[in-house]
Amino acid sequence: MSARRSGPAGAPGGGPGSARDEILARMRTALEGASPAPAVPREYRRALDAGTDVVAMLVDRLVDYKANVHRGAAAIEDALAGARRVAVPADLPAEWRRGGAEFVEDRGLTVEELDGVDAVLTGCAAAVAVSGTIMLDAGEVQGRRALTLVPDHHVVVVRRDQIWGHLAEALPHLDPRAPQTWISGPSATSDIELQRVEGVHGPRRLDVVILD
């Protein structure tokens, strides 16, 4: 999470008399004498039925989102086909660095340098089959958030043991203190006339390599 610096009094995040303190004081006043908050119901579904093929479901969702799906470590080279320079986290395993591309370790690459590579190759923290979502929390073999948002082509490796059926099963495997990126297919958005535009918020091309 981004840190907020303290500013002068009267400014957001400032000392006594700041706007932040004033807002919090109003909230405390408004809550005086209020009854305790009711218990939140937790009867919602937290897992898929036993026997559900979560890998097949994840693949189905990813393909529907226009992502390219590959199986096995050898397919990393296919996913990176045509890429000459590939940005990677410094701790990316050597066995994932496949093909004839130049692998550029991210040790503080600038935005311009990240924009100049052909692709980025990372791992992930978890994946959710029911929604086709891949999650990153800047942890091991994932790199920092900018690494997977600036380049136009993201190749992400997902291990079988990182695939969960339901969101509630995947959340405990994420670092709640870290900046997170949740990916459901290539970056795309639509305007009010439903004109689809790709690449606005991240990579326009997403390749997913699943390691069984």
Image (cartoon, grey):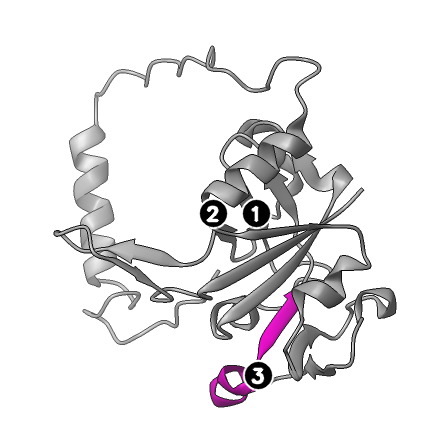
Q: Which mark is residue 184?
A: 2
Q: Is residue 114 shown in magenta?
A: yes
Callout 2 amino acid: Ser
Asked if the residues shown at circle 1 and circle 2 are in contact, with their CB atoms under 8 angstroms apart, the answer is: yes
Question: Mark 3 = which residue?
Answer: 117
Q: Dot 1, crowdedness within 10 Å: few (<14), some or many (≥20)?
A: many
> Disc 1 and disc 2: Cα gap in Å?
6 Å
Percent x, y for residue 21?
A: 24, 55
Q: Dot 2, crowdedness within 10 Å: few (<14), some or many (≥20)?
A: many
Q: Is any part of residue 128 visible from this angle?
A: no
Of the pair 96 and 91, the residue shown nearer to us: 96
User: Which residues lie in the magenta part?
Assistant: 109-121
Asked if the residues shown at circle 3 and circle 1 are in contact, with their CB atoms under 8 angstroms apart, the answer is: no
Outermost residue toward the right? 95
Q: Which mark is residue 23?
A: none
**In the depicted structure, whether residue 127 falls above or below residue 192:** above
